Amino acid sequence: MSTCQMSACHLSASPLDYAVWSILEEKACAKSHKNVESLKRALKKAWNEIALVKIVGDFPKRLKACMDTNGGHFE
């Protein structure tokens, strides 16, 4: 397994992976922002609303998916 593949698997298995960014983007970018400070406030608010318990609870399922694909791509 290459370093790139290992990194991809590691990121996919991490409970705080790209899924969190997707949630943050969906919540914080639901409306446009006039400046960076407005975006920062929206991101902080979105972060505080994320159900981290659910994300961490999904870890075993994501780890199994990573193992089932031998470290390959999965969603």
Image (cartoon, grey):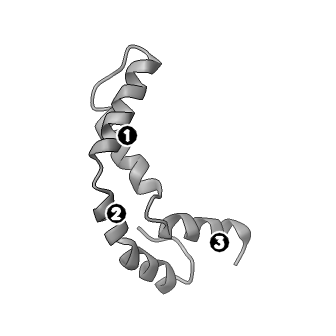
Does the residue at mark 3 contact the one at mark 1 (Cβ under 8 Å)? Answer: no
Residue 55 — which label?
2
Left or right: 51, with 5 as reference point: left
Task: Judge whether 19 appears above or below 15 on screen.
Answer: above
Near mark 1 (Cα within 10 A), the count class, few <14, some 14-19 or many ≥20, is some
Q: Nearer the viewer, residue 29 or 41?
A: 41
Residue 43 percent coordinates (x, y):
38, 34
Q: Which mark is nearer the camera, 2 or 3?
A: 2
How many numbered discs sit on the rendered protein? 3
Residue at which label 1 appears: 25
The secondary structure type at the circle numbered 3 is helix
* Residue at left offset 37%, top offset 40%: 25
Q: Mark 1: which amino acid?
A: Glu
Q: Quadrant of the C terminus?
A: bottom left
x and y, in percent, of residue 55 in the image:
34, 63
Q: x%, y% of residue 35?
A: 43, 15
- Kindly identify which residue carries mark 3: 6
Going by the numbered disc 3, the residue's amino acid type is: Met
- Residue at 36% from the left image edge and 78% from the top image edge: 61
Check the picture and name the quadrant holding the N terminus: bottom right
The quadrant in which residue 9 appears is bottom right
Q: Earlier in the sequence, mark 2 or mark 1?
A: 1
Q: Quadrant of residue 64?
A: bottom left
Residue 20 is situated, as x and y percent measured from the top left of the image, at 40, 52
Question: Marks 3 and 1, how far apart in space?
Answer: 26 Å
